[in-house]
Amino acid sequence: MQQPFRRHGIRQGVRHGVRHAIPRRRIRPRRAIALASVTALTLAVSTSAGTGHLTAKPTTSAEATPLASRGTTQLGPCMIRGRVGVQMSEGIPTPPGYSRSTGTVRALNLMIDFSDVPGEGSAMDRFAEFAPQTQRWFRTSSYGRIDYRPEAPVTEWLRMPKPFHAYGIERGAPFEPGYRRLVQDLVRVADPVVDFRAYDLVNVLVTPNAGPSALDTVLSVTFAGNKEAPVADGKPVANASFVYSRQDDGSGSYDETGYRVLPHENGHVFGLPDLYTHEGGGAVGHWDIMSEDWGVDNDLLGWHKWKLGWLDAAQVGCASAPGTAEYTLTPLATTGGGKLVVVPLDSRTAYAVELRTRAGNDVAVCRPGVLVYKVDADIDTGNGPIKVYDSRRDSGGCTRSPNVHAELSDAPFVPGDAFKDVRAGVEITVTEVDAAGNHRVRVMRR
């Protein structure tokens, strides 16, 4: 049983909203972003060398009760949503059409090759590059709420009827017509031995010698919520991820890190957008696998865990009303306790606050503390829908892990630090840390 979110402050308002969107959206292919410096913040971020205790506005005793006892409707003002047509919006709830992200999720894995690029090694070796580690990653990140089951009913390479070059697969290739032909051929070859109705999503693991090296260009791509996809056994192949090449940086860590392209791509079939920006900016850094899926392991942001159904309502605080509220955050990697505070700015944008530590999937955290970021449900995938704020701008970061966005590695706020948005009238202060490592945060808003 989850522990309730401990919260004190001003009573929240209630507002409901359901976002309706066209689910048929193509996910733009990932790209290896240069680890560039973050652009300067547009909002004021201040760091104090003092105790971090602020003079707060008066609070009311009505807010001493946990969110769980007030029901999930109290989260309504924090369930931001984008306009219809936003590609892979960060809005909550996720619209229909994507694979479910809780309970038992059966992932069909098909290993394919071509006459001009025959399978490199055995098909089951290719499957083993991803399956067990991806399963463990999802179990850890979701606190066991998703039972991700990778299955490979066909243990040999499935030979496609056309050579690889005939499909016109390249970076940024649209679903029409090349991928449609590939999926049609895949269904035609696999259907006699595979019951597609038994699976929630499809992973197409292409022989790694097809196409260029991932160091040159990244072909891996996901088509999610595509109900106009070819049909297999009466079911559209609507949520399918394609993985090419090997994301090997030459550091010798591929066996431990190479699998991470798959949970990233599967994040799309669950409705999560790309957090990197196509212009090469590092808006989120290594704080979410939807931003950087190379290098050492990392987790998802708390916002995404809420979006995927891995957090209870009692674990999310909604600071929507004027006044002062205080929350106790427990480490995001641990089960139970308060995990996320949301400060809505309007119906489409919000700040999110969470505690990140070196635990679980977060092996590269070098400055534990409170992460503050902005979520914009109106920004398309790949255009920077989330932005992490750096408590120590231009410091160069603290990580020494290879292929990690170093500048944002020391982004978390620690006791005595405060984040301020003067224009919006929002101030988020980390006031203290207890013996168990939980952090207390105070949210003040006009």
Image (spheres, rainbow, N blue to C red):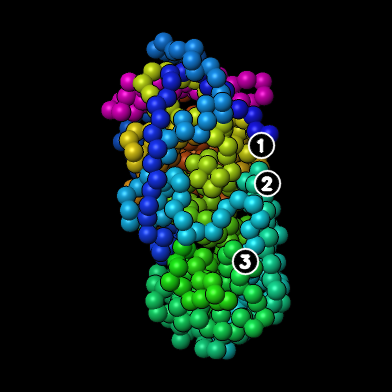
Helix, strand or loop for the magenta stretch, by majority: strand
Q: Quadrant of the C terminus?
A: top left
State which quadrant residue 38 falls in: top left
Residue placed at 57% from the left, 53% from the top? 101
Q: Point out the stretch of residues depicted in magenta.
A: 420-446
Check if mark 2's residue and mark 1's residue have beta carbons within 8 Å: yes
Residue 237 coordinates in the image, percent (x, y): 52, 71
Residue 441: mark? none
Single out the residue that lies furthest toward the left: 423
The three-letter code of the residue at mark 3 reads Tyr
Residue placed at 67% from the left, 24% from the top? 436
Q: Earlier in the sequence, mark 2 or mark 1?
A: 2
Q: In 3D space, how far apart are the residues under numbered discs 3 and 1 (Cα atoms)?
A: 28 Å
Residue placed at 45% from the left, 78% from the top? 180
Which residue carries the number 3 mark?
Answer: 199
Q: Quadrant of the N terminus?
A: top right
Q: Earlier in the sequence, mark 3 or mark 1?
A: 3
**Magenta-drawn stretch contains 146:** no
Which of label 3 and label 2 is nearer to you?
Answer: 3
The vertical placement of 146 against 418, above or below, is below
The vertical placement of 138 against 444, above or below, is below
The three-letter code of the residue at mark 2 reads Gly
Residue 335: mark? 1
Nearest to the observer: residue 444 or residue 81: 81
Which residue carries the number 2 mark?
Answer: 144
Q: Is residue 280 left or right of residue 222?
A: left
